[in-house]
Image (cartoon, rainbow, N blue to C red):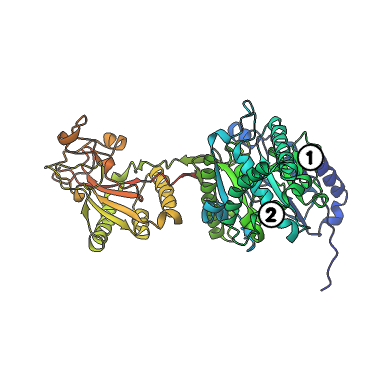
């Protein structure tokens, strides 16, 4: 079979350019009836999608944004085509309405190469080595800029210079770059550029023409940066050898602003070996920084998960020089990136498990770090999601009485397994836990129960109420994440699963607050008999409480006596920092 010629057409993602291409193709439509075409939409979650989708969902309208409408025209002009959406952040694509013509039919997760260093590498496996926290005072405030460069910026610049000095003689043709992502506002960019230029000029002058005290001061300042790099580059050349290169490097480094006001729109990376880029929005999506080693990002958090990910220009194929890489971030951003890494791994895993099945069979569900407001821009969303907050507190189903017979069977096998496998201990040795009740059996703890058996029990429960089902899906998803599951789960039998001392509560009261409180409520010290159900947990790992409750207007036997109803409650530790989003039908 002979190879057939293919025509490659590149089109700027601009409504006018796309429409022009569509118009040209329409004139050849009769010739293209049997000609297969492939439309590749790079960064397909940006600009391509209908920014009026949310408005349409709420009002029943049919509005279309310009670029989206132009892409629809392009697709209409090709009678025999496939449309491929390519992006590292597919959240927006996965939120499109079922009726949207750009709603994807299938998803394929592409794995990176071995030399790729991404979120897990930076924020999970090597965070202590590569991530440097910035203090709150380092965060850029465009309305209150300091008069001098923060010490953290100076240290980041020293780290970059030493890394560049190590590369200069070894790899004279390879770029080494530093990126300063300061602010969405462009005004501070000039300030950061001036600080950097002044520092480079000052260090070059002092090392060339300064007296010995000045040169020694420079050595001392650079020594801490050298020691920092030496942690991850054991064979780094001696400090004095690297310092010889610093004056020349300070002269050669190109420092430029990359923003809407900057003079350089397209960087010619071959025109210089060493670069420092200062900017904001233009350094986010789709901007490639060649040889990036040091990122200094004193910015506040983005509200959207996909924007946060796109801001991570420091991800990439950097294994060959990863020891020279450092990322300087405020602590809230570090926590958000760390959470996002795990949330993204969950998304990739669920999409991979869906395999070649249509996405129509995949119910949209996501984990979302609590520091992040949205998965993506709200205006493109054509589906309704419910956010279930897992904020380091207690959660419990509200309608377990509806299936108390079935759940009693689940309780029975789980209780038998726990009593036969684990040692049950009193919990009063835990600080803040008090139980001096004489009319109730003790609360007993089984520590470090296998999360696998815990999840098996929770998933075995019968929950007829849809709200309870969604809650349990969220909880079991969070508990099943590897960094949580590996520690196991603590199981507490409240009152040893008995009902001695109970007189019964109404269903509405129980649904409002499942937990028995302090007794007496205002007591302190020796007069306190019971510290309350909520205190019977450990913060080492998640806690699963099992109890039997009597409901005055609930199930009863033929003789009229109240039937114990099995009920569960889960305490999620603060380190489960992601909420659960699930599609509502």
Q: Nearer the viewer, residue 262 or 584?
A: 262
Give the percent coordinates (x, y) of residue 127: 53, 52
Residue 508 coordinates in the image, percent (x, y): 29, 34
> In the figure, residue 180 lies in which quadrant?
top right
Q: How far apart are marks 2 and 1 (CA)?
A: 51 Å
- Would residue 71 appear left or right of 459 to someone viewing this image? right
Q: What element carries label 1?
A: helix
Q: Residue 15 carries which label?
A: 1
Q: From the viewer's side, name the closer residue of 230 and 325.
A: 230
Question: At x 43% / y 49%, what residue is drawn?
Answer: 473
Look at mark 2 in the image and give the residue it sits on: 242
Q: Where is residue 14 in the image (x, y as percent from the top left)?
A: 79, 41
> Image point 71% across, 53% down: which residue?
165
Q: Which of the 4 image quadrants contains residue 232? A: bottom right
**Residue 149 % position (x, y):** 64, 35
SS class of the residue under badge 2?
Answer: helix
Tell whether 486 sits left or right of 130. left
Q: In this view, does 187 lie above or below 239?
A: above
- Badge 2 density bin: few <14, some 14–19, many ≥20, Cα 10 Å: some
Residue 233, disc: none
């Amino acid at each position: 079979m002979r190879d057939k010629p293919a025509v490659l057409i590149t089109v700027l993602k601009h409504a006018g350019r796309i429409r022009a291409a569509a118009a040209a193709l329409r004139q050849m439509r009769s010739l293209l009836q049997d000609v297969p075409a492939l439309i590749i939409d790079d960064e397909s979650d940006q600009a391509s999608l209908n920014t009026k989708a949310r408005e349409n969902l709420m009002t029943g309208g049919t509005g279309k944004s310009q670029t989206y409408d132009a892409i629809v025209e392009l697709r209409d002009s090709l009678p025999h085509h496939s449309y491929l959406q390519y992006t590292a952040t597919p959240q927006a694509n996965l939120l499109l309405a079922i009726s949207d013509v750009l709603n994807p039919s299938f998803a394929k997760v592409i794995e990176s190469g071995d030399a790729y260093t991404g979120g897990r590498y930076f924020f999970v496996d090597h965070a202590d080595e590569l991530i440097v926290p910035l203090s709150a005072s380092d965060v850029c405030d465009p309305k209150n800029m300091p008069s001098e460069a923060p010490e953290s910026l100076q240290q980041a610049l020293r780290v970059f210079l030493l890394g560049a000095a190590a590369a200069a003689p070894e790899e004279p043709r390879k770029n080494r770059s530093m990126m300063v992502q300061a602010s969405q506002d462009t005004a501070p960019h000039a300030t950061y550029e001036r600080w950097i230029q002044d520092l480079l000029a000052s260090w070059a002058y002092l090392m060339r023409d300064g007296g010995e005290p000045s040169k020694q001061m420079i050595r001392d300042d650079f020594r801490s940066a050298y020691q920092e790099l030496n942690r991850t580059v054991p064979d780094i050349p001696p400090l004095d050898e690297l310092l010889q290169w610093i004056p020349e490097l300070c002269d050669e480094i190109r420092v430029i602003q990359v923003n809407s006001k900057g003079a350089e729109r397209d960087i010619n990376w071959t025109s210089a070996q060493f670069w420092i880029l200062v900017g904001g929005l233009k350094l986010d999506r789709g901007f490639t920084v060649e040889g990036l080693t040091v990122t200094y990002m004193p910015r506040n958090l983005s509200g959207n998960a996909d924007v946060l990910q796109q801001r991570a220009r420091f991800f990439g194929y950097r294994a060959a020089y990863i020891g020279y890489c450092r990322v300087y971030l405020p602590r809230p951003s570090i926590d958000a990136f760390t959470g996002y890494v795990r949330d993204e791994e969950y998304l990739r895993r669920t999409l991979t498990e869906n395999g070649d099945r249509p996405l129509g069979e995949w119910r949209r569900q996501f984990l979302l770090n609590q520091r992040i407001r949205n998965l993506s821009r709200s205006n493109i969303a054509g589906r309704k999601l419910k956010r279930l907050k897992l904020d380091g507190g207690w959660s419990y189903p509200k309608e377990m009485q509806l299936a108390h017979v079935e759940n009693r069977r689940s309780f029975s096998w789980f209780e038998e397994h726990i009593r036969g496998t684990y040692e049950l201990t009193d919990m009063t040795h835990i600080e803040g836990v008090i139980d001096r009740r004489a009319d109730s059996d003790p609360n007993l703890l089984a520590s470090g129960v296998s999360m696998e058996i815990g999840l098996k029990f929770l998933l075995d429960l019968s929950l007829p109420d849809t709200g309870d089902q969604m809650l349990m899906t969220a909880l079991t998803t969070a508990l099943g994440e590897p960094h949580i599951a590996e520690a196991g789960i603590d199981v507490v039998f409240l009152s040893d699963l008995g009902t001695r001392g109970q007189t019964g509560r109404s269903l509405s009261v129980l649904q409002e607050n499942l937990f028995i409180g302090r007794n007496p409520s205002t007591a302190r010290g020796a007069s306190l008999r019971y510290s309350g159900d909520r205190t019977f947990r450990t913060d080492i790992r998640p806690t699963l409480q099992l109890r039997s409750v009597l409901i005055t207007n609930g199930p009863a036997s033929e003789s009229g006596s109240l039937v114990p109803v099995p009920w569960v409650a889960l305490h999620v530790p603060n380190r489960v920092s992601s909420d659960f989003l699930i599609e509502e039908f």
